[in-house]
Image (cartoon, rainbow, N blue to C red):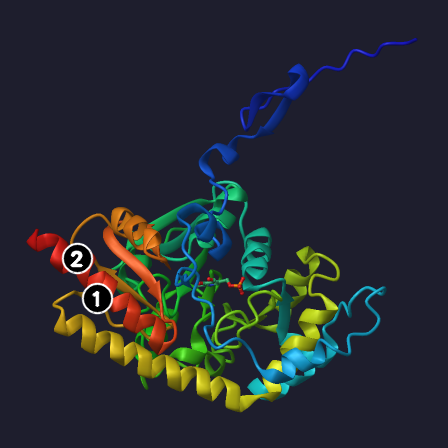
Amino acid sequence: MKFYKIRVIIHSNVIKKLIKGGMTMYFRKILEEIKAYVPGKSIEEIQREFNINKIAKLASNENPYGCSQGVLQCLNDVKNIEEYPDNNCTKLREMLAQKHNIKETQLIFGDGSVEILSMISQVFIGPDDEVITCTPSFSSYFTQAKLMGGKVIGIPLSNDVFDLKGIINKITDRTKLIYIGNPNNPTGTIITVDEQLDFLKSVPKNIAVVLDEAYYEYVTDKQYPNSISFLNEFENIIILRTFSKAYGLAGFRVGYGIASEEMVVELNKVRNPFNVSTLAQNAACKALMDKEFIEMVVKNNTQVLNYMYEQLDRLDISYISSQTNFIMIDCRRNGMKVSQELLERGFIVRPGFPLMDDYIRVSIGTLEQMKEFIVVLDRLINEGEKQ
Ligand SMILES: Cc1ncc(COP(=O)(O)O)c(C=O)c1O
């Protein structure tokens, strides 16, 4: 038997790790800086851990009203599952192009909008390129850019809102990409049409600007921009939308981006083939047909959000006014601890955002869920303080 001597050249951008069986593997060094995404605990996990039956999952901004009946019906006549999906998402593309009055070639589809975030980093970011966003904001902006070797600059929010002037001040000739969450997750705040216009005018045209509008449908503020109308003037923007939130299709994973045709050509080069499943494409088409469902969801969300404002004001608990289906609440003590205490009482919420240690992010559930939540929160924050 012949043995070959393999010489491994160890670069500074790798780390050596011993894995099972004494083998040595070389992993990318950047992975040391990246943590795996940790989703909120599932209802089943909490049921098992705390032996409680009734649990409200208010951690992932999911839709408490489910999804359109049309979507559920289309699941009964699923066909051609043995075949790969339509790589072009033809029907969905046609429907969205018509809805938004754009060209079909201006659309890119993803396995959730988070996949498009990953495509965007692959297209724009190389080692040592700079990416600017605010913090706290959606964690994927940071991970995706870092994975490509980029340097992410996270500017603190200004009064809970994206600090656009702060972003402009940090632009250098290495800046390739800017992420704007509008509305921002986790604060639920927006930037207005005038602010967005002024900002885009100040950003050099060769820097791509991602306008992440995952919560677009929920916004009621009249000052919220219609970003699609900006596309003619600003060819450097990419607008992201998703079917995961107001449409209630988080389990299907469909999101889309709207950008210039040239930008879409490049994004398509890094897109995984057949990345949106047949079921997900069908479901999204059906969801688009049901305008009444979305109207019902948004109306209920606004009502329950107003109920939350009234109750939190009554209880003297501070919060950040939100344009989304979630709200940031100030617990006046460590949010991690409060969230653990809520967990034991059957409410799953999200703590642990950078620079906001005392806050928890609470998704807006049904009125019944939020009534129960408020009673428990009052006990944990106000009554707890009196003891
Ligand atoms: C601001 C923001 N952008 C993007 C996403 C990704 O959504 P999805 O991948 O489900 O489309 C989320 C999900 O929570 C989000 O909050």
**In-image side of 330 versus 2 (left or right):** left
The residue labelled by disc 1 is 319
Q: Residues within 10 Å of mark 2 (few under 14, many from 20)?
A: some
Q: Nearer the viewer, mark 2 or mark 1?
A: 2
In the displayed structure, does residue 117 sit left or right of residue 106?
A: left
363 and 346: which is toward the camera:
346
**Above or below — where is 283 with respect to 123?**
below
Q: Quadrant of residue 305?
A: bottom left
Residue 345 in percent (x, y) is at 32, 56
Badge 2 or badge 1: first in the primary sequence: 1
The residue carrying mark 2 is: 381
Q: Secondary structure at mark 2?
A: helix
Amino acid marked by disc 1: Tyr
Whether residue 174 can be seen here: no
Question: Taking the image as drawn, is residue 95 in sight?
Answer: yes
Residue 254, picture quadrant: bottom right
Residue 314 picture location, percent across and down: 13, 74
Q: CA distance from mark 2 to mark 1?
A: 13 Å
- Above or below: residue 33 compared with residue 268: above
| Residue type beneath disc 2 | Ile
Q: Position of residue 126 (x, y in %)?
A: 54, 45
